[in-house]
Amino acid sequence: DARVTQTPRHKVTEMGQEVTMRCQPILGHNTVFWYRQTMMQGLELLAYFRNRAPLDDSGMPKDRFSAEMPDATLATLKIQPSEPRDSAVYFCASGPGARDYGYTFGSGTRLTVV
Amino acid sequence: EDKVVQSPLSLVVHEGDTVTLNCSYEVTNFRSLLWYKQEKKAPTFLFMLTSSGIEKKSGRLSSILDKKELSSILNITATQTGDSAIYLCAPSSPNAGGTSYGKLTFGQGTILTVHP
């Protein structure tokens, strides 16, 4: 089965450090989403891309977060500097873009900022 | 601001019980409502609903949408321990042009625990 690959699976870092999370979407999928999941807020949309162009990043704290798709096989989410409140599971999802279903989530990156 | 409320937040039942999970939404430019199941890791797709009153079924799971009441329910009959998971509902709320497919607003989820 095709899958969305996220790395790293777990990351523990100190406050103030830069964190980079990576996502390899399913080949042929032109739409990529980044979500963050916490117990308090649930799943929140941070940003999404279609054909590598950012369509909406209004859910993302702009001062410290950035999301890019340097090519069709890689999406990145960076946090600089990281803060303890950024501790969460970050999910990437990819899909065909022309409909609301058919999106596959990766297994997530569990980030802990101490 | 888009809002999705699921109830109950958690539910504990025994195998064989039937459960009903609720989802209420207030979103702009509503197009469809999706249900996901999340076990230990990533959410997995269950249903997509676009029309009111038409039930979608998959085995022991079924779901229906009420666009007048801005709500949906997910039913699980004859529950099994493997149904234990977080169930998430997510309306699709595209931009004004309707071109942003897959843009979902998730509810908090209902944590279902099924005991043997």
Image (cartoon, grey):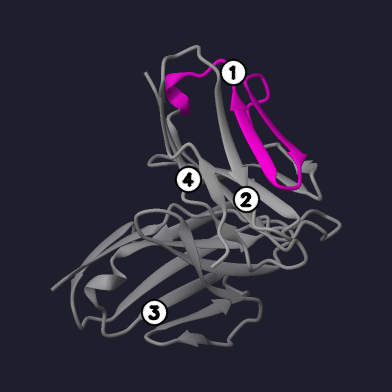
- Tag on residue A72? none
Q: Is residue A66 magenta?
A: yes
When asked about the image quadrant of residue B38, the answer is bottom left
Element class at badge 4: loop
Q: Is residue A72 above or below residue A1?
A: above
How far apart are the alpha carbons under marks 1 and 2? 28 Å
Which chain is indicated by disc 3? B
Question: Numbered disc 2: what chain?
Answer: B
Q: How many marks?
A: 4
Judged left or right of residue B86, residue A60 is right
Q: Mark 1 or mark 3: which is in front?
A: 1
| Observer-nearest of B71 and B87 | B87
Q: Whole-Å distance between the Cαs marked 1 and 3?
A: 43 Å
Spatial CA distance of label 1 from label 4 is 19 Å
Compare residues A38 and B39 and report the one nearer the observer.
B39
Write down the residue under mark 2.
B2
**Of the numbered discs in the image, which one, if any, rests on residue A108?**
4
Instruction: Give the residue type that dot 3 points to.
Output: Asn
Task: Say if labels 1 and 2 share a chain.
Answer: no
Q: Amino acid at mark 4?
A: Gly
Same chain for the residues under marks 4 and 2 in the image? no
Mark 3: secondary structure: strand
Q: Look at discs 1 and 2 and give the one toward the viewer.
A: 1
Parent chain of label 4: A
Q: Position of residue A90 (x, y in %)?
A: 50, 40
Tell me if mark 1 has few (under 14), some (14-19) or many (20+) residues whose alpha carbon lies within 10 angstroms of its own. some
- Residue B101 locus on image (x, y percent): 74, 61
Place of residue B39 in the rendered image (x, y in percent of width and height, measured from the top left):
36, 60
Q: Residues within 10 Å of mark 2 (few under 14, many from 20)?
A: few
